[in-house]
Amino acid sequence: MGPYHSLNLGDHVGDRPDAVASNRTRLAQALGARPVFLQQVHGCEFATICGATVDGVTADACITTVQGIACTILVADCLPVLLTDVEGRAVAAAHAGWRGLAGREGQGVLEVVCRAFWKARGDEPAQASDTLAWLGPSIGPQAFEVGPEVKAVFEASDPAAAAMFRAHGRGKWLADLAGLARLRLHALGVTRIYGNDGTGEWCTASNPSRFFSHRRDGVSGRFSASIWLV
């Protein structure tokens, strides 16, 4: 039991290294692909991964065109975003916490990874209209309390972002992280978006029997969201 009792995949949260290694092996067996784990730093850098890529590359997004290599994001409240194109020639994954999502001057991790993803097919680049996006579980708008500076940074690049915040008293706001990601993807021309719609079943903090949550528990394991080519 305790904070790591259910298939923790994070090697940086205080769990036993042998337990994490065993859990990662179990994940790979379940996927039928090799997950590549990033060192996520709440930034906007991406990595192109292949069979030779080792775990621990510092990046918050990754892309591959290689079969059997799973782009993998560790999750405990931040939003995982998985991408592919309609022909399934490439896949990508992004770790979208509010800092990485906001980025600088409206250019965050989703803008960076989408543009790189569209180039990844080489001679036949994908387009926004060909792109499929899936938003995974994250802390939901009923639980994600932020300060006014977070609201301000999103509104500075898109006034429509104001609709993704709800006043919560004491100068605080509740933020809809998945809603903010949808706004950013729509601005890029990506409209085929699935998964997390901001309802309670997707909220990591509100579902302790289903999800790890750092915001809820303080010390917490990590689960993953993965996408790969077969």
Image (cartoon, rainbow, N blue to C red):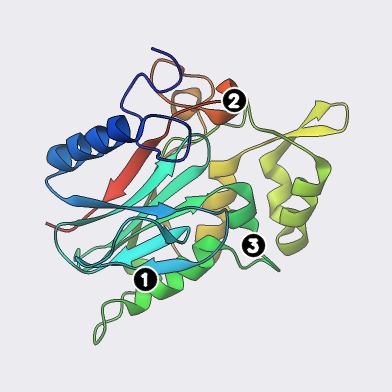
Residues at marks 3 and 1 touching, judged by CB atoms closer than 8 Å: no
Residue 202 lies, in percent from the top left, at 45, 29
Direction top: furthest residue: 1
Can you tell which quarter of the image residue 48 is in? bottom left
From the viewer's perspective, is 3 left or right of 173?
left
Query: 107 or 223: which is nearer to us?
Result: 223
Which amino acid type is marked by label 1?
Phe
Q: Residue at x 48, y 58 (%)?
A: 60
Residues at marks 2 and 1 touching, judged by CB atoms closer than 8 Å: no
Which amino acid type is marked by label 2?
Gly
- Between discs 2 and 3, the one toward the N terminus: 3
Q: Residue at x 28, y 33 (%)?
A: 18
Q: Is mark 2 on a helix, strand or loop?
A: loop
Q: Quadrant of the C terminus?
A: bottom left
Residue occupied by mark 2: 218
Can you tell which quarter of the image residue 23 is in? top left
10 Å crowding of disc 1: few (<14), some (14-19), many (20+): many
Disc 3 to disc 1, how far (Cα)? 18 Å
Residue occupied by mark 3: 103
Disc 2 to disc 1, how far (Cα)? 34 Å
Residue 4 lies, in percent from the top left, at 40, 23
Which amino acid type is marked by label 3?
Gly
From the viewer's perspective, is 166 left or right of 208?
right
Residue 52 lies, in percent from the top left, at 22, 68
Query: 80 or 168: which is nearer to us?
Result: 80
Residue occupied by mark 1: 117
Q: Name above or below for residue 112 compared with residue 228.
A: below
